[in-house]
Amino acid sequence: MILHAGLIAAFGPGGWRGVLIEGPSGAGKSDLALRALDHGFRLVADDRVILWASAGALYGRAPDSLAGKMEVRGLDVVTEPGLPFCRIGLSVELGTPERLPEPAWKTHLGLSVPLIVLSPLESSAPAKLARALQHLGAWAEGAYQDGRAAVPLPRPGGDSR
């Protein structure tokens, strides 16, 4: 399956995990990916992503003709050392996020990964991607979402015991 999307990856416990970035043309997919590279992410694919499923996991890579290339709007198509492929641990839709969204998932090829909505041009967007990978199941196996539901409410008069 080929998607009009970008794919970047970060290294953590268990190896590289990818962030699949989807949105309409001109929405900021490549811009977000470019800024994420300055935050320790690596390019896997820009503009087109080939997806496949293996052993119950979703994977992605660039088409051969686009491997190691990235469009930097207003500059050119540049060479960017990248990963040949990675397991996808998070899906991002570009848009206006809710303040505290309900847990959501995106399904491709019958496999679901955690989904977040992100404003791509916010300066905090790359940091949010890193946090989401840590907390939404790619490495924490859903601990963030489970923990959020279990947070005790503050007691009247403060939380000191």
Image (cartoon, rainbow, N blue to C red):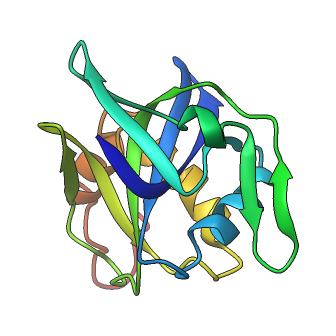
Quarter of the image that includes the N terminus: top left
> From what the image shows, is residue 129 above or below residue 144?
below
Picture coordinates of residue 22, whole percent (x, y): 41, 64
| Residue placed most toward the observer, 119 or 28 | 28
Residue 31 located left or right of residue 63: right
At x 73% / y 38%, what residue is drawn? 68
Q: Residue extending furthest left?
A: 110
Residue 22 located left or right of residue 150: right
Picture coordinates of residue 63, whole percent (x, y): 53, 37
Residue 81 located left or right of residue 124: right
At x 76% / y 51%, what residue is drawn? 37
The tally of labels here is 0
> From what the image shows, is residue 77 above or below residue 113?
below
Query: Where on the picture, by quarter, is residue 110?
Result: top left
Q: Residue extending furthest top?
A: 55
At x 27% / y 74%, what residue is drawn? 101
Quarter of the image that includes the C terminus: bottom left
Picture coordinates of residue 19, whole percent (x, y): 49, 47
Residue 68 located left or right of residue 114: right
| Residue placed most toward the observer, 96 or 100 | 96
Picture coordinates of residue 125, whole percent (x, y): 61, 70
